[in-house]
């Protein structure tokens, strides 16, 4: 027996276990299920705060632990891993590397490497931190619920509580030096310190309105904004606050000044106000959006960025004379999605919005619906033939993959909520007031059927030409076995409203609805059995690929998945709290989910082969291999890399022993930023290495697979 070889192997195993343990400690709290944003990009969660240290380098934070970072003035934004799903409300950077983010549940995150990694600081409570301001890398102040004020003088290694003298919620803080700062909040609260927070003095604002943001231009000059268009200004350190005429009664959420005279205010309904005389007069600027804007920052007199609802990012380079969106895609609500295969799908939504993809959602193109009415559901029988329905009896039909959509006569003005086709000609639509419509000629004629109810019907599913089931409000379930000539009510066993339905054969189906309701039948609805969802959220849609594998979506970003026909449901991380309304699963490993604020999410563990690279930008910054996302991951991940010029590229995967296990690409590529999918479903849990080679340039990243 060779004891030396055994000891070496033993040491190697111990090293492997140690590496895995350290990686698990770092990442397990935020292991993701593999749902990634496809629209809008870079993401669609609300953004609450933005900070730029110069015209190029900036960071924005928002809901569900979202942290975005740019180094090119917002031409591209990279989503950073925050390690939390808590909503984030404030961000402050003092240089390109050093920054602090605060948020819900007393979240404090700190980075010293530009956001590549974040360290949690402070203690975990239920309170919410809402504002943060630093004067240098070491000295900062945080404010939050119940009058909480924290102070650090060592970069957050220790945060000390300070007495605010109030229990009101504090929304924002601004400090101009180590001694002088102000905080504002609910109940027109304004607090001031001149001794680094050793004491805070309440000031009279002269207003009763909720104040949401404050910005100090100097120790004496400051601006605060809030509810009902409130703008207050002080020039004497807060001894007196003068109300200014904003010209609006809308909520104002953010304020920033580049000097004593020039400033900007942002708020609800896309409001942007600008002054060049210290607020004596305010003029409205066109943001081009309807959503609220929560924060604004300028890096010089001309260059500014504003962020807000639906992940909105606006940028100006001319002092706000024009604001340009820096997100790609739409923020219209999506209510329906239908895929016929892994790559071809259609999403429909508010104001007649229709998007179409032929590459699995890597690119979504807008199609002309010729309606302004919201569309609620869509059904494609193949890549060419599809039907979508919506409010006021809207029915649209395409026979060429959406190149053109034609309006059909529904014969009703009731809102239509669900549609299903079993072949090119045969389809059924359900809607308000118990509406059921049927066609056998591709929609040339729609015939009204008697449902026997006036309850709103929300979803319908047919297996074959004759057998179908419809669901609706108050637990209503209807069944037909003769193509809708007659509909028979079934006992659902619940009075909760039902919204989504999916059958895989004549007998086996799942229905979902209010308060986390999931019911299943294996006998065509003769009886329905309740399943445990483990949640109380409203569930809106369900899609089963076969009798075992299915996905449910719902409000607050809910995604549930089962591999055993619903015997157990596992909650997955969607990466958002946006409401989700529809899901389509063309095979067992691929799913697309849509929802409000333009949300389109995709999970893909099999549909894109290794080496199928997609260019996502044509203005690369140089040779770079970026961290894969998500990481750690269960089955698939996306690897991003850039190349400055035409070069022969090699991208390979190695295991912990240094053995090459996969070649994702090996070919000449043009300049650009690319993404490549890696399917690791057949590989065991463990550490892997991704190695990018272009000539003499080599970069490597660690990846962690967790099964």
Image (cartoon, rainbow, N blue to C red):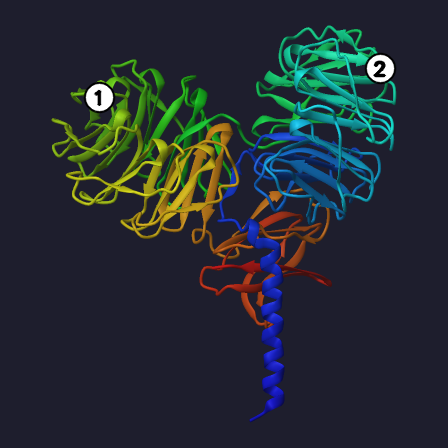
Quarter of the view holding residue 498: top left
Residue 651 visible in the snapshot: yes
Which residue is the site of mark 2? 261
The residue lying at 83 percent from left, 41 percent from top is 153
The answer to whether 137 appears left or right of 393 in the picture is right
Q: Which residue is mark 1?
A: 446
**Of residues 543 and 41, the one drawn nearer to the viewer in this rendering:** 543
* Residue 134, image x, y percentages: 80, 35
Q: Position of residue 155 (x, y in %)?
A: 79, 43
The local crowd at label 2, few if under 14, some if 14 to 19, many if 20 or more residues have their Cα within 10 Å, is few
Instruction: Identify the mark nearer the N-term, 1 or 2.
Output: 2
Residue depicted at x 45% and y 25%: 353
- Residue 179 vs residue 523, the one in the foreground: 179
Secondary structure beneath dot 1 equals loop
- Whether residue 630 is visible here, answered yes or no, is no
Name which quarter of the figure residue 48 lies in: top right
Element type at marker 2? loop
Above or below residue 113? Residue 25 is below
Quadrant (top left, top right, bottom left, bottom right) of the N terminus: bottom right
């Amino acid at each position: 027996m060779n004891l030396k070889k055994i000891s070496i192997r033993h040491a190697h195993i111990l090293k492997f276990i140690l590496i895995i343990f350290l990686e698990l400690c770092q990442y397990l709290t935020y292991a993701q299920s593999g749902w990634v944003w496809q629209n809008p990009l870079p993401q669609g969660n609300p953004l609450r705060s933005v900070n730029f240290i110069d015209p190029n380098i900036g960071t924005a934070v928002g809901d569900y632990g979202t942290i975005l970072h740019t180094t090119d003035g917002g031409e591209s934004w990279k989503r950073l891993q925050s390690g939390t799903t808590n909503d984030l409300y404030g961000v402050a950077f003092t240089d390109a590397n050093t920054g602090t983010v605060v948020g819900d549940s007393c979240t404090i995150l700190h980075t010293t490497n530009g956001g590549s990694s974040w360290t949690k600081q402070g203690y975990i409570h239920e309170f919410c931190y809402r504002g943060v301001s630093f004067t240098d890398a070491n000295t900062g102040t945080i404010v939050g619920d119940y009058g909480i004020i924290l102070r650090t003088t060592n970069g957050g290694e220790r945060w000390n509580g300070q007495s605010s003298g109030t229990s009101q919620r504090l929304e924002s803080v601004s400090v101009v030096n180590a001694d002088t700062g102000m905080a504002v909040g609910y109940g027109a609260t304004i607090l001031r310190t001149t001794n680094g927070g050793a004491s805070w003095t309440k000031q009279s604002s002269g207003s009763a309105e909720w104040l949401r943001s404050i910005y100090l231009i100097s120790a004496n000059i400051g601006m605060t904004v809030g509810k009902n268009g409130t703008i207050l200004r002080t020039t004497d350190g807060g001894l007196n606050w003068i109300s200014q005429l904003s010209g609006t009664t809308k909520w104002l959420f953010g304020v920033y000044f580049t000097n004593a005279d020039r400033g900007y205010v942002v708020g609800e309904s896309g409001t942007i106000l600008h002054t060049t005389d210290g607020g004596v007069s305010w003029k409205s600027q066109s943001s081009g959006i309807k959503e609220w804007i929560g924060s604004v920052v300028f890096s010089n007199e001309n260059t500014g960025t504003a962020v807000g609802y639906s992940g909105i990012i606006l940028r100006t380079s001319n002092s706000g004379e024009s604001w340009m969106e820096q997100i790609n895609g739409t923020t219209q609500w999506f209510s329906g999605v239908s895929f016929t295969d892994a790559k071809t799908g259609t999403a429909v939504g508010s104001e007649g919005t229709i998007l179409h993809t032929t590459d699995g959602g890597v690119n979504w193109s807008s199609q002309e619906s010729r309606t302004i009415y919201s569309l609620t559901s869509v059904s494609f029988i193949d890549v060419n033939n599809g039907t979508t329905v919506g409010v006021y009896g809207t029915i649209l039909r395409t026979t060429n993959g959406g190149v053109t959509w034609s309006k059909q006569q529904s014969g009703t003005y009731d809102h239509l909520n669900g549609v299903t086709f079993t072949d090119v000609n045969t389809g059924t639509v359900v809607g308000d007031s118990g509406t059921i419509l049927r066609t056998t000629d591709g929609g040339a004629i729609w015939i009204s059927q008697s449902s026997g109810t006036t309850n709103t019907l929300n979803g319908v599913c047919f297996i074959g030409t004759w057998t179908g089931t419809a669901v609706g409000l108050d637990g209503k379930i209807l069944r037909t076995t003769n193509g809708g000539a007659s509909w028979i009510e079934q006992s659902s066993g619940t009075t909760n409203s039902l919204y989504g339905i999916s059958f895989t054969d004549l007998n086996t189906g799942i229905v979902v609805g209010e308060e986390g309701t999931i019911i299943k039948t294996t006998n065509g609805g003769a009886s329905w059995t309740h399943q445990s969802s483990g949640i109380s959220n409203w569930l809106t849609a369900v899609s089963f690929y076969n009798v075992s594998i299915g996905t449910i979506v719902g409000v607050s970003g809910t995604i549930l998945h089962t591999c055993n026909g619903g015997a157990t449901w596992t909650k997955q991380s969607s990466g958002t709290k946006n409401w989700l309304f529809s899901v389509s699963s063309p095979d067992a490993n691929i799913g697309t989910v849509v929802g409000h604020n333009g949300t389109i999410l995709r999970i893909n563990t099999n549909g894109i082969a290794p080496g199928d690279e997609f260019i996502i930008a044509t203005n690369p910054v140089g040779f770079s291999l970026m961290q894969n996302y998500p990481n750690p991951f269960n089955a698939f991940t996306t690897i991003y890399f850039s190349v400055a010029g035409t070069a022969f590229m090699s991208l390979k995967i190695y295991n912990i022993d240094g053995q090459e296990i996969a070649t994702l690409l090996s070919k000449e590529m043009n300049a650009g930023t690319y993404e490549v999918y890696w399917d690791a479903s057949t590989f065991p849990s463990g550490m892997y290495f991704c190695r990018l080679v272009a000539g003499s340039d080599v970069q490597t990243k660690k990846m962690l697979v967790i099964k």
